[in-house]
């Protein structure tokens, strides 16, 4: 029971940290880092014989999955914005759907609705902006 409580507390802490604002340039690294942290905590808790071994294996697997899913999600949004039609990617039990919504001529940004399902359950539904250029100042 103590392990389950520790695992749940670790997971909730990481979920709250992951909701911090991110930029598109470093989102893949943040996804990999978050996946590594969750994987390390889970691996350490699940390997009774050698928690360090479990943490290392869990961190490696979590980094690959977290970074991969974040990169696929980012590409889905960019492709949906540029082609102006929905894009669906699937990897194992994760499905990512990006649907273009609107274009703002003033900011040159496309609004894209991104939904992510894991094991058939909707885990994320948000609207994000995909801009055509790089933001250098407070204005586009």
Image (cartoon, rainbow, N blue to C red):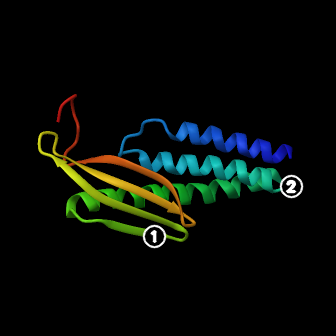
Question: Which secondary structure lies at badge 2?
Answer: loop
Residue 79, above or below 40: below
Residue where numbered disc 2 is placed: 48
Q: Nearer the viewer, mark 1 or mark 2?
A: 1
What's the CA distance linking mark 1 and mark 2? 33 Å
Picture quadrant where residue 140 is located? top left
Look at the numbered discs 1 and 2 and tell me whether their residues touch, using CB distance below 8 Å: no
Indicate left or right for 92 with 128 as reference: right
Q: Give coordinates of residue 40: x percent, y percent.
A: 68, 50
The one nearer the camera, 139 or 84, is 84
Q: Give coordinates of residue 7: x percent, y percent.
A: 74, 46
Q: Residue at x 37, y 68 (%)?
A: 88
Indicate left or right for 83 with 57 as reference: left
Crowd around label 1: few <14 · some 14–19 · many ≥20 (10 Å): some
Q: Give coordinates of residue 113: x percent, y percent.
A: 34, 53
The disc label shown at residue 90, or none = 1
Q: Which residue is drawn at 45% across and 55% down?
A: 70
Which circle's residue, 1 or 2, is located before the other in the chain? 2
Q: Give coordinates of residue 91: x percent, y percent.
A: 49, 69
**Residue furthest to the left:** 105
Crowd around label 2: few <14 · some 14–19 · many ≥20 (10 Å): few
Q: Which residue is drawn at 70% across and 54% down?
A: 56
Picture quadrant where residue 86 is located? bottom left
């Amino acid at each position: 029971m103590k392990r389950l409580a520790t695992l749940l507390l670790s997971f909730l802490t990481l979920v709250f940290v992951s909701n911090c604002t991110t930029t598109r340039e470093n989102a893949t690294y943040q996804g990999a880092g978050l996946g590594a942290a969750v994987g390390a905590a889970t691996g350490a808790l699940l390997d009774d014989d050698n928690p360090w071994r479990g943490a290392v294996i869990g961190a490696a697997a979590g980094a690959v999955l977290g970074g991969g899913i974040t990169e696929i999600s980012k590409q889905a949004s960019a492709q949906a914005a540029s082609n102006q039609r929905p894009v669906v990617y699937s990897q194992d039990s994760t499905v990512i759907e990006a649907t273009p919504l609107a274009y703002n001529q003033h900011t040159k940004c496309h609004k894209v609705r991104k939904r992510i399902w894991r094991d058939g359950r909707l885990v994320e539904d948000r609207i994000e902006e995909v801009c055509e250029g790089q933001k250098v100042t407070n204005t586009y």
